Image (cartoon, grey):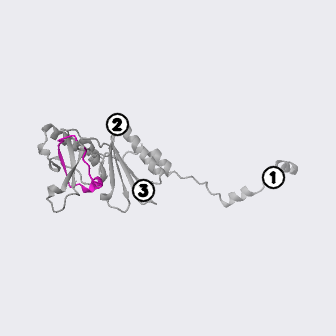
């Protein structure tokens, strides 16, 4: 039977630390948002260690913690979402308990995967020189929404205008190619503009969004005002053709 956790386990801020090992049986279930499949015996798995609500606080630290298991790709997806202050894996050798006990090829695999994640997030950071970023705000709802794109990856960030960056929600997405990433980037901006958001700032190449932004910003042109003399002439009654002929 698959192991179960309490509803509080989904709270990303309950993570105490991370671990890794090989599944000792096929009983544990992956807690990936779109997975929830069993993790086969012998498979490399990653875990979040959280407080066990069924163990009294007087117990030792080890007894108070319980693992929530993930397939490796599912853990990557979990770490790509959530608020900025969410606990994340930044150094696999130090952040993953049990890393030293893994096979050499699995150690190398994890190092490569998390090095790639570090590079991806760096390329989409606020200080990136290669990412294109669009920032919008919603005046009535007092919210902001921002999306960045670099190659075939995107980063969405949103929150309330008066909250700190650490409370913002982020979402990293990776697509199979650059065209799909651009389509997603443009579609999300269009949705926000239709929903009442207004463009505040853009950085990088804006050629892919100029049409969308232009439509949002375009204002109806007003006719030029007539001078007093022009208005007087326009309101005078013009003689009809027959009247003019009679005067002749």
Magenta-tinted stretch: 1-26
Q: Earlier in the sequence, mark 1 or mark 2?
A: 2
Q: Which residue is mark 2?
A: 177
Q: CA distance from mark 1 to mark 2?
A: 71 Å
Q: Which residue is mark 3?
A: 137
Asked whether, in this view, residue 169 is left or right of residue 89, the answer is right
- Residue 60: image tag: none
- Viewport quadrant of the N terminus: top left
The residue lying furthest to the right in this view is: 246
Q: Residue at x 82, y 50 (%)?
A: 240
Mark 1 or 2: the one toward you: 2
Characterize the local packing of mark 2: few (<14), some (14-19) or many (20 or more) Cα atoms within 10 angstroms.
Answer: few
Q: Which residue is mark 1?
A: 239
Asked whether, in this view, residue 97 is left or right of residue 220, the answer is left
Where disc 3 sits, the SS reads strand
Characterize the local packing of mark 3: few (<14), some (14-19) or many (20 or more) Cα atoms within 10 angstroms.
Answer: many
Whether the residues at callouts 3 and 2 have beta carbons within 8 Å, the answer is no
Q: CA distance from mark 3 to mark 2?
A: 29 Å
Q: CA distance from mark 1 to mark 3?
A: 58 Å
Residue 65 placement (x, y as % from top left): 19, 55
**Residue 15 highlighted magenta (yes or no):** yes
Characterize the local packing of mark 1: few (<14), some (14-19) or many (20 or more) Cα atoms within 10 angstroms.
Answer: few
Q: Earlier in the sequence, mark 1 or mark 3?
A: 3
């Amino acid at each position: 039977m698959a192991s179960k956790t309490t509803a509080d386990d989904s709270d990303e801020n309950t993570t105490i630390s991370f671990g890794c090992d090989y599944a000792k049986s096929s009983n544990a279930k992956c807690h990936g948002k779109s997975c929830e499949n069993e993790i086969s015996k012998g498979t490399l798995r990653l875990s979040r260690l959280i407080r066990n609500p069924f163990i009294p606080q007087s117990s030792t630290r080890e007894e108070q913690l319980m693992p929530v298991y993930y397939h490796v790709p599912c853990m990557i997806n979990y770490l790509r979402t959530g608020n900025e202050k969410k606990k994340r894996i930044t150094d696999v050798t130090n952040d993953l308990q049990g890393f030293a006990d893994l096979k050499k090829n699995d150690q190398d695999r994890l190092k490569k995967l998390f090095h790639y994640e570090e590079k991806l997030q760096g390329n989409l950071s606020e200080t990136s020189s290669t990412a294109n970023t669009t920032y919008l705000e919603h005046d009535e709802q007092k919210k902001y929404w921002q999306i960045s794109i670099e190659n075939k990856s995107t980063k969405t960030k949103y929150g309330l205008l008066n909250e700190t960056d650490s409370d913002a929600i982020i979402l990293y997405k990776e697509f199979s190619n650059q065209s799909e990433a651009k389509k997603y980037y443009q579609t999300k901006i269009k949705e926000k503009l239709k929903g009442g958001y207004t463009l505040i700032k853009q950085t990088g190449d804006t050629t892919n969004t100029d049409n969308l932004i232009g439509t949002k910003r375009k204002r109806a042109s007003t006719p030029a005002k007539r001078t007093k003399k022009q208005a007087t002439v326009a309101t005078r009654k013009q003689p009809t053709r027959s009247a003019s002929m009679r005067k002749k």
